[in-house]
Amino acid sequence: MLNTQGTVECSSAEVDFDPNRIEILKKHFQSLVDDNEIICATYCLSRRGKVFAHGGIGYKTYQKDPKQLVSPTDIHYIASVTKTFAGIAIMKLVEDGVIRLDTTVGEILPQFDSPPFNSITLFHLLTHTSGMFSDGGCFPNKHNDGSYWHFIDTAYGAYLNDKKTDKGEFDWIAAALAYGVHCEPDKEWMYCSFGFIIIGEIITKLSGMHCHKYIEEHICKPLGLNDTGFDITPEMTKRYILCDDGAIKMVENILNGKSNDEENSELWNKIPSTGGGMVSTVADMVRYGNMVLHGGTFDGVRIMGRKTVEKMTKIQISKPDFCWGGNGGIRNYGIGFDHRNGPQFTFSDSTYMHEGSGACALYIDPDEELVAAWISPFVDRSKWCTKAMYNTVNVIWSGLC
């Protein structure tokens, strides 16, 4: 077995978790590596605030070099798990009396202050009920005939080609909104990462600090999440999981001080990455999850208040869901946290979570005081490897005594 061990704080027996099930978890990930479904997996499990399992299975690179096994401390993008950080950042501003969730976005960003956007609130963005178009791939039909990113890119090209000397600064928000909306707010649950990009812009405007820096300074650094943030440092590249040629090029560019998008870097550097741009390790994600599990305070560090956490992590909406073949079934959602449940899972009904494409996961079960995080990069990222995600949940929860 291609197994590496990380640092733990106690034995599984000390927190009433069957040690044999950890071995089953390792075999589960190893079988997915052997079947060429995932490149590798790193995992970290804690119960009652103590890490009892931490390890890695498989290779550090997609080239499957046996001399480069993945380490439990290796780093990867956590994709949409980033959205939970953005949600907490907004809720900190709510706690400080700066804003409320029922505030319309148009009161903060003037581009939203006219139909059909003027009835969209912060709450709608945070719960994916804004009526704005969902991410590409959510629908195999007319809903997927463009994207907000496409409209930005097209408008920016025209802006660059405009020879006027007084054309002003490019308005990427106005450019994106030319795409319009799918429906009015509060009708459907439609997974919209672009809504969380707007959340990032709101954080920047309300806090007076760029949203990336605000999240890092007010959440990551106080908690000691030293491997979590929006930038990959040269030191981090040594521990970065390489999933494809693009990742190798990215690492080379970082080491050489180059941008990964030289052509439009000036534009893309201005647009927040709060929809999915953070990197982390599984240990950092578990520490972050424990802060949420323990009411906003962990190891004596307060990030937010208990009642704010309760608001975020309880079901706030139950709406029809047509995304990814949802067929109109009811989707439950909190503030930035998902409450997906069903016959395929064995966790407690109170469990909340978020997953990231590519893929990674953070699950928090308050009834069992269990926090689980894993990163399991898919070999074929055009397909969702259900076994690496849903099946892994059930293997982990089977160990609870």
Image (cartoon, rainbow, N blue to C red):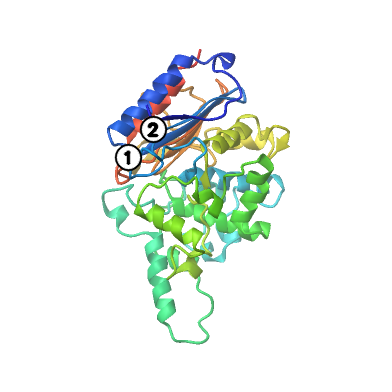
As shown in the figure, which amino acid type bears the numbered disc 2?
A: Met
- For residue 2, the mark is none
Whether the residues at callouts 1 and 2 have beta carbons within 8 Å, the answer is: yes
- In percent of the image, x 36 and y 32: which residue is there? 388
- In percent of the image, x 65 and y 57: which residue is there? 206
Looking at the picture, how far across and down is residue 45, in whole percent? Answer: 52, 27
Looking at the picture, how far across and down is residue 86, in whole percent? Answer: 56, 48
Sequence order check, earlier mark of 1 and 2: 1
Real-space Cα separation, disc 1 to disc 2, in angstroms = 9 Å
- Given residues 145 and 62, the one toward you in this image is 62
| Labels in figure, total | 2
- Given residues 173 and 391, the one toward you in this image is 391
- In percent of the image, x 52 and y 33: which residue is there? 315
Q: In which quadrant is the N terminus drawn? A: top left
Q: Is residue 36 above or below residue 399?
A: below
Q: On the picture, is 107 further left or further right than 143?
A: right
Q: Residues within 10 Å of mark 2 (few under 14, many from 20)?
A: some
Q: Is residue 182 above or below residue 339?
A: below
Q: Which residue matches tag 2?
A: 389
Asked which quadrant contains residue 153, the reply is: bottom left
Q: Which residue matches tag 1?
A: 384
Examine the rendering and report whether any part of residue 214 can be seen: yes
